[in-house]
Image (cartoon, helix red, strand yellow):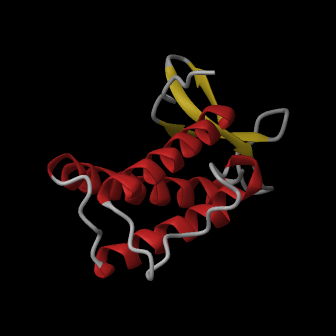
Amino acid sequence: MNKESVDLFEKIAAQLSGLYEEMSVLSKKNPNDAVNKFKLRFINQQIAECNGFLEDRYRPFNEFENFKEDDIPQNSDVVFILSQYLQCLEKLRSDNAVQRAGSWYWQVKGEEDDKIDKEGFIYIRTSQPKRLRG
């Protein structure tokens, strides 16, 4: 991880979380309703961005690329998939975050211009990683 990937992570995680919250509300009301194509297009865009960012190590399902427009998913299907992606993003955060002086930080490789520690890392403040089971 580097500074740019932390920025991208924060963007992806925020957008995915927003989609998850919106779809969860729909799923609680009507879990078996089909997702409209407008929403599905943005959901698929976000999943594609996550797939590229997470790579094989953190992707929840290597064989899953996106939802097919010809086989429109139900609200509950989308919530299921988005929750798996959020868990994998949180695993990535957990693997790259450290606690220092009571706060949580991304520990990432620094560049020449950065104020790096003796191991070559810089620290970027983040939220506390959620505790994952397993």
Taking 90 as reference, is 19 above or below it?
A: below
**Residue drawn at the location 61% of the way across and 32% of the way down:** 94
Taking the spot 44% from the left edge, 81% from the top edge, the residue there is 69
Q: Quadrant of residue 56?
A: bottom right
Q: Residue furthest top?
A: 102
Give the quarter of the figure containing the C terminus: top right
Q: Depth check: 129 or 46 in front?
A: 46
Q: For the point 65% across and 61% down, which residue is it? A: 53
How many labels sit on residues? 0
Instruction: Give the farthest residue toward the right.
Output: 119
In screen coordinates, is 130 left or right of 111?
left
Residue at the image position 43 percent from the left and 48 percent from the top: 80
Relative depth, front residue between 131 and 26: 26
Q: Is residue 102 left or right of residue 17?
A: right
The part of the image, by quadrant, that contains residue 18 is: bottom left
Look at the picture and state if 34 lies above or below 14.
below
Residue 95, how many percent across, how many down?
Answer: 68, 34
Residue 97: image location, x then y, percent: 62, 32
The x, y position of residue 102, in whole percent, is 50, 17
Please tell me whether residue 110 is drawn above or below residue 70 in the rendered image.
above
Q: Position of residue 83 (x, y in %)?
A: 44, 45
Compared across the picture, whether 102 is left or right of 60 comes to left
Q: Is residue 76 left or right of residue 53?
A: left
